[in-house]
Amino acid sequence: QVQLVESGGGLVQPGGSLRLSCAASGFTFRSYWMYWVRQAPGRGLEWVSSINNGGSVTSYSVSVKGRFTITRDDAKNTLYLQMNSLKSEDTAVYYCANDPEYKSRGQGTQVTVSS
């Protein structure tokens, strides 16, 4: 079955950086579009970024464009999200998913941006 395990979150000061990882198993990772979504306290899921199978097409929400970079390593079955210039409003639990409804998402990793 599909298993997605997010890691790399933590507490970081505004302006700092983090790199999130998502280890995938149970499906043919290289064949799937992958997604990062997040959920801030008291709010619904928010799409953050997508990458196509092969990694040649990426897209970002307006709120993170220019600061976040999504990449994938198909040899390692791993998805990444490099987050730079972090802001307090980026505080959320971050999830990866392999479906556009995000039903496959894992347990998430907490990102807290605070001084």
Image: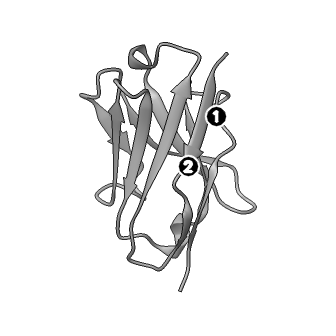
Q: Residue furthest left?
A: 56
Q: Position of residue 63 (x, y in %)?
A: 43, 59
- Residue sitting at 43 percent across and 26 percent down? 77
Marks 2 and 1, how far apart at CA = 13 Å
Give the amino acid type for the residue marked by disc 1 in the picture: Arg
Q: Position of residue 104 (x, y in %)?
A: 65, 27
Q: Position of residue 66 (x, y in %)?
A: 28, 58
| Location of residue 27 (image quadrant) | top right
Residue 1 relative to residue 35: left or right:
right
| Location of residue 65 (image quadrant) | bottom left
Q: Position of residue 58 (x, y in %)?
A: 31, 36
The relative height of residue 49 versus residue 115 in the rendered view (above or below) is above
Can you identify the residue that label 1 sits on?
105
Mark in front: 2 vs 1: 2
Can you identify the residue that label 2 sits on?
7
Q: Tag 1, which secondary structure?
A: loop
- Residue sitting at 34 percent across and 24 percent down? 75
Q: Residues within 10 Å of mark 2 (few under 14, many from 20)?
A: some
| Location of residue 2 (image quadrant) | top right
Quadrant including the N terminus? top right
User: Relative to the observer, which residue lies in front, 65 or 51?
Assistant: 51
Count of marks placed on residues: 2
Residue 22 seen in render: yes
| Between discs 2 and 1, the one toward the N terminus | 2
- Residue sitting at 41 percent across and 14 percent down? 31
Residue 98 seen in render: no
User: Relative to the observer, which residue lies in front, 34 or 77?
Assistant: 77
The relative height of residue 38 versus residue 16 in the rendered view (above or below) is above
Give the amino acid type for the residue marked by disc 2 in the picture: Ser
Q: Residues within 10 Å of mark 1 (few under 14, many from 20)?
A: many
User: Relative to the observer, which residue lies in front, 96 or 66?
Assistant: 96
The relative height of residue 87 versus residue 98 in the rendered view (above or below) is below
